[in-house]
Each structure stands twice: as C-alpha cells, then as structure tokens.
Image (tube, rainbow, N blue to C red):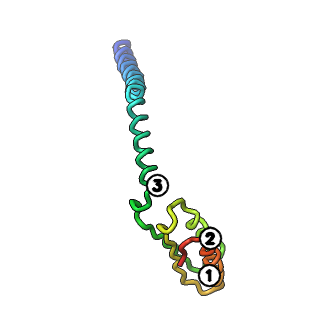
Amino acid sequence: MTDLLIIIVYFIASLFLFSYGMNCYVVVWLYLRTFRKGAAINAAIERDQKAIWNSPGTLPKVTTQIPLYNELNVAERVMRAAAAMDYPPGMHEIQILDDSNDETSQHIDKIAELLRAEDADVS
C-alpha cells in the first residue's frame, strides 16, 4: 500500500514538472513566432513618435510645478533638473512655488535668473 502511494505521488510530481517544462517551451515558441511582428510594430511606433516630436504643434504645453519650503539644499538641483527636461522650447513652463521663510527665496531667485538667461521659462 505504501509503495502504491509513493508511486502515485511520484507520478503526480513528474506530471507537474513535465507540464511546467512544456509551458516554458510554449512560451519560447510564442515569443519567437511573434518576434518579427513585434519588431515591425516597434519600428512603426518609433517612426510615429519621431514625426510627432519634430512637429511641436502636436505636443501640449507642459507646466512643471516645484513646491519648495525651506529646502535650500535641493532647490537648485530640482530647478536645473526641470529645466534640463527634453521638451521643445517654448512648450515647457516651470513654476517655482516657494513659501520659504529663510534664505532659500533669495537663492531661488538667483537660480531662476540664471535659468532664464539659458532660455528656460521659469516663473
């Protein structure tokens, strides 16, 4: 009786492992079958994105709001990171929302002037 139980458990475990292995082969087969079709679709998407990017009239105007409160150490980094975003000129506005009650406000004003000199729309 014990021998029969061990054989049944062994058979069920072997069947489970066989099913799992076959599933791996099926997934690899499906991937290889659709690889070329996916590459063509990705190329078409990339081509369309380049066409949209080269015609700024189709892109929306974007506003990045940066709320700050007494954050002297991170103010310059976050402002420069927002100004460095890759978006067409004139379509990206940066708003600095500052409620600081220390020297952060003066530092933000200096950085904003520098960024405006670099043609960033900072207010």
Residue 54, numbered label: 3
> Which residue corresponds to the image point at 40% horizontal and 24% vertical from the top-left?
29
The answer to whether one can see residue 81 in this image is yes
Q: Nearer the viewer, residue 75 or 38?
A: 38
Q: Earlier in the sequence, mark 3 or mark 2?
A: 3
> 2 left or right of 92?
left
Q: Mark 1 is on which residue type?
A: Asp
Gap in angstroms between the C-alphas marked 3 and 2: 22 Å
Q: Residues within 10 Å of mark 1 (few under 14, many from 20)?
A: some
The residues tagged by marks 1 and 2 sit, at their Cα atoms, a distance apart of: 14 Å
Task: Tell me the amino acid under the disc marked 2.
Answer: Glu
Say what secondary structure mark 1 lies in: helix
The residue beneath circle 2 is: 118
Q: Is residue 50 left or right of residue 69?
A: left
Residue behind mark 1: 109
Residue 98 image position (x, y, % from top left): 54, 81
Q: Nearer the viewer, mark 3 or mark 2?
A: 3
- Compared to residue 70, the image places residue 17 above or below, namely above
- Residue beneath the point at 56% across and 79% down: 69
For label 3, the SS is loop
Amino acid under disc 3: Asn
Mark toward the viewer: 3 or 1 = 3
Q: CA distance from mark 3 to mark 1?
A: 33 Å
Q: Position of residue 81 (x, y in %)?
A: 59, 65
Residue furthest bottom as drawn: 101
Pick the front one: 65 or 12: 65
- The quarter of the displayed image where residue 21 is located: top left
Q: Earlier in the sequence, mark 1 or mark 2?
A: 1
